[in-house]
Structure formats: structure tokens, C-alpha cells
Amino acid sequence: MMNFKYITYDVADGYATITLNRPEKRNALSMDLLTELNAALWEADDDTEVHAVRIKGAGKDFSAGYDLAPTTETSVRPKLRNSTYRRGALFYGQAASCDDDSWRLEYSQSLRMAIFDMHKPVVAQIHGHCLAGGTDVAFLCDIVIAADDAWIGVPPTRDIGTTPNCMWLYHVGPQWAKRLLLTGDTVSGADAAKIGLVLKSVPPELLEDEVTGLMKRLGRIDSDLLSGNKRIINIGLELMGTRTLQRIAAENDVRLHLTESSLKFREVVIKEGLGAALAARNAKWPFKDCRVRVDRPEPRDDMGRFTDTGG
């Protein structure tokens, strides 16, 4: 098994735990982290001691999304500018052709699809923020359990694109998928459970024990039985077009990268840095007022800010 830098990998009680381990970056999903995640998933699938896999995040968040900052990672560093490799021209750092952008999104997607394709069940344990790319990892998992106070959503749909893995429709149906992706609004773990976006939510102090209890149960079941029961359900999803939709989702994200708002976002990143671009987004859409209430009114002023204290 390879040595990991951006994740940790542990096996106990019949299951593996993969921890996204870039807490200083809020577990932002870099290409190197996704490469390690892919390797760890297939390691777990190959190991007969492992019956199931848990994915969680170190620090305060599950994952704040994809790492859009300029990279110095080992897998990309030798192939930066003036290179013949597609991975050398990062989308937000310099210009890229549509096909280059599509290739990179599809390559990144192929690393995450191991969650869906592997034989053994994968459980996501969501705490803190699970945003943008973090949701691409979480919703490919077979079961998602969240803390009540987790916040889940894809804010980049407001200005730079869409999710290149689109499992939202299969979890919550078309109306809630549209409500959340059209606005980029976020939903709490507790509310996510009400609409079926996650299996259930629990108080944050109980999350670790809740998921550990489930993993221990899975760890005692014949892994061949787990495989058969996972795969027949996933074949059903494939018959509903899930795999084809993932390919189209990546291509759709490429198209949206060419919108006026996305090009403006990239221009700010190049001239002023990623922090300035994100600050401009937050100034226009204050995060605390971009939270959905799934079964309560949302009184708002003309700027979209809540006019009550309903939480």
C-alpha cells in the first residue's frame, strides 16, 4: 500500500476509515488528494479484511470543495506552463481549451467514481461544511450521515459553474435538486435528512459514534453479500441513466465555465487572487442568508437577507 500525504487510511473491526487530511485547507480537494483517495478506495476493495469504507474529514469540515488555488503539488508541478500536458494549464490560472477543460473534469471525475464502482459499500460522515466538490464525494457514497449542524450545498453554481458529479436528482428528486443547485443555497444536516439528501442527521457530538456503530455492523457481514446488495441497487441507478448523467454533468460544467459570470470570476482570481474572488461572492450573497429552510417560511428583504431570526 502506498504512503499517503493528503489522506489517512486505517483498518479496524472489519472496515476501513479514509480521512481527508488537509484541515488547514478545509480539506479542499486537490488532484493529489483525489488521486490518493482513489488509491485508498481500491486498496480497501481489494483487501478481504475490509467489508466497508467510511469517508470523513479532519478538522472543522468534511470538505469545502475543490482546491482552486494555484498549485505546487507533485503531480502537476513538473507539467506547468509551456507544457504539452493538459494538466499543466489549470482552468482558473490560465486559459484552457474546452476540450482541455473537459478532459481534466472527466479525469478528476474518474477518480471519484471509484466510490460508486467499487464492490464494497461506502459511508460518508459529514460534519462542518460539505460544499461544492465535497458534495461530489459525499453523494457518490452509498449512505450519508450528517451532523445536524452541518452545512451542505454548491455555492459555485451562483457564479462559476455546476457540479461535475450530479447525484442530487437521485437523492432528492427534481424540485429540491433545482431549488438547491439553481441558487447555490445551502441546507443544514437536519434539513438535508428531511428531504432525503442524507440518510439521517444526528447531534454533532453523537456523529462519530453513530457512524462507527453502523460501520461495525457492516464489518460483521459477509463482504460478498454486501457487494451483491450494493451492486444490484447501483445497476438500477445505471438503468435510470446515472452513469450517463455523470459524463454529461462534466461537459455541462465546461459549458458553464464560459459564461460571463464565470469568466469574470476567473479574471478576479488571476488579477487579485482566489481570496478576493470568494470575498466578492460572499459580499453579494452573505452565507448566513443563503441557507434553505425546508419546512419553514423564508421572509427576506430586497437584498435576499432574512428579516427574522428563524435560523
Image: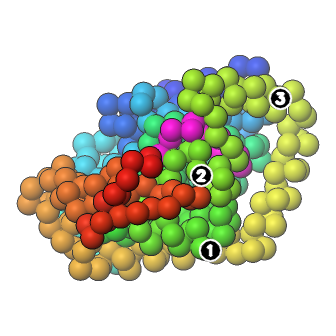
Q: Using the numbered discs, state the Cα–Cα distance from disc 2 to disc 3 in whole angstroms.
A: 24 Å
Closer to the N terminus: mark 1 or mark 3?
1
Dot 3 falls on a residue whose secondary structure is helix
Residue under pointer 1: 174
Residue under pointer 3: 217
Dot 1 falls on a residue whose secondary structure is helix
Q: For residue 148: magenta?
A: yes
- Where residue 12 appears, as percent x and y from the top left, is 71, 19
Residue under pointer 2: 192
Q: Using the numbered discs, state the Cα–Cα distance from disc 1 to disc 2 in whole angstroms.
A: 15 Å
Callout 3 environment at 10 Å: few (<14), some (14 to 19), or many (20+)?
A: some
Closer to the N terminus: mark 1 or mark 2?
1
Question: Answer yes or no: do the residues labelled 1 and 2 have beta carbons within 8 Å?
Answer: no
- Where residue 268 appears, as percent x and y from the top left, is 14, 63
Q: Is residue 38 visible?
A: no
Give 196 or 50, whichever is nearer the viewer: 196
For the record, the magenta segment spans 140-151
